[in-house]
Image (spheres, grey):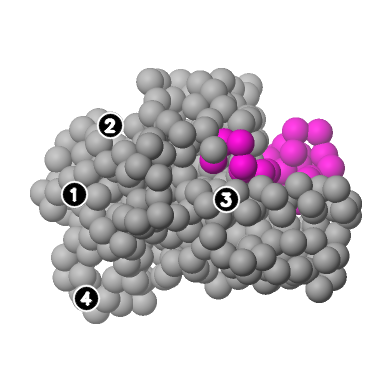
Amino acid sequence: MDSSANCPFCHITLPPSQLQRHANSHFDEDDGGADAEKDEQLARDLELAQQLSIPPSSLTLQENNTMDEKISCLIALQYRSSFYHVKFPGGLISLLSNCFELDADTNSTILLSGYVDHFQSLASEDIGWGCGWRNIQMLSSHLLSHRHDARELLFGGSGFVPDIPFLQRWLEIAWEKGFDALGSHHFNHSVYGSKHWIGTTECAAIFRSFGLRARIVDFGPKELQSFFLSVPGTSLTPTVMTANASDKRKAFQVYGPMDRYLVGRNSDVSQLDSIVNDKSQSTTNYMAGGSDHSMANRFPRKKEGHQVLLDWVWNYFSEESLTTSVQNRHVVITNRVPLYFQHDGHSRTIVGIQSRPQKNGVPQYNLLILDPAHVSNKPAAFFWLDY
């Protein structure tokens, strides 16, 4: 084990590998109110977490440290990730719905997901590399709020969204269980304590490891392979992942309504974004990943790739059987899970879509986005992409 070191601010003892992060937390507004007792407990937890993080190949790892023991230890050590609590009944989505209801533009239709917490990247932790983890946290906040089965399964039944270092350990456990073997090999089976960028395959592996079905569909055309800003370890060609996430197939295969929709639009599919489907029984959760829009104009196509994506997102949120609000309202909160949306080397979370009629009869769509790169307590944390 590493020798211990004292924090220069509060003088508690921590492993050297955790000292910088702990010291930085003294300058984080969200953590400024933590008392000494909590800090001491955190230091003890982090020291144990350091032991837990030893790679499986290390000679110092106890042979009898079974998967169940690792999971039990992680459940005991993990702690809740901080985020900005929106002080409005029903949270951020309800506040957004209320704002749209008061909007004079009643010609538009807005479809929203249910409850979501916004997790922002912090200067002391993950700015520049943590967007993928933050989007996983946002999706998890929705699942924990809306689905009893997910609440029992996710993160050992803790009932909360863990901080990034513990999500990293959950990903490593998913790899050890056999999920996304290619991605695991790329990262040398270890991401704990690193600043590696992650994407849709890692997101899917985590949710699958808890028993939630997941799939990644990449809509990028083969002509753009060399221009894709893909997360290392993911495929550069259009892919559909099988149910156990251990195989990535280049040939598009039809598995359900989403794939049938895309096959029907096959001549138009020059799309530059991906969507991950995470579903358990009758409830469906989609997340997305993608590539560089700026290169798309170099290649001919019958229809703009982003328009196919927008059509699909609209259909996803507008499925009649999943709406819970009164029909004929211009703002509808659905039962749909938010979308993990990755593009241009960045990822965000789609929490809804707005449709506005135009004179030519073609609706104008705006994606309603939560961006982990923006500060939660400022309006810019939520914005829409205009198409």
The part of the image, by quadrant, that contains residue 324 is: top right
Of callouts 4 and 2, which one flags the residue occurring earlier in the amino acid sequence? 4
Q: Position of residue 299 (x, y in %)?
A: 21, 74
Disc 3, SS: helix
Would you say residue 311 is visible in this rendering? no
Of callouts 4 and 1, which one flags the residue occurring earlier in the amino acid sequence? 4
Circle 1 Cα neighbour tier, 10 Å, few/some/many (<14 / 14–19 / ≥20): some
Q: Nearer the viewer, mark 4 or mark 1?
A: 1
Q: Nearer the viewer, mark 2 or mark 3?
A: 3
Give the residue number, with chain letter if any, for mark 3: 49
Q: Position of residue 332 (x, y in %)?
A: 61, 32
Disc 2, SS: helix
Give the residue number, with chain letter if any, for mark 1: 248
Give the residue number, with chain letter if any, for mark 2: 257
Do callouts 3 and 4 mark residues in contact (Cβ within 8 Å)? Answer: no
Q: Nearer the viewer, mark 2 or mark 1?
A: 1
Give the residue number, with chain letter if any, for mark 4: 226
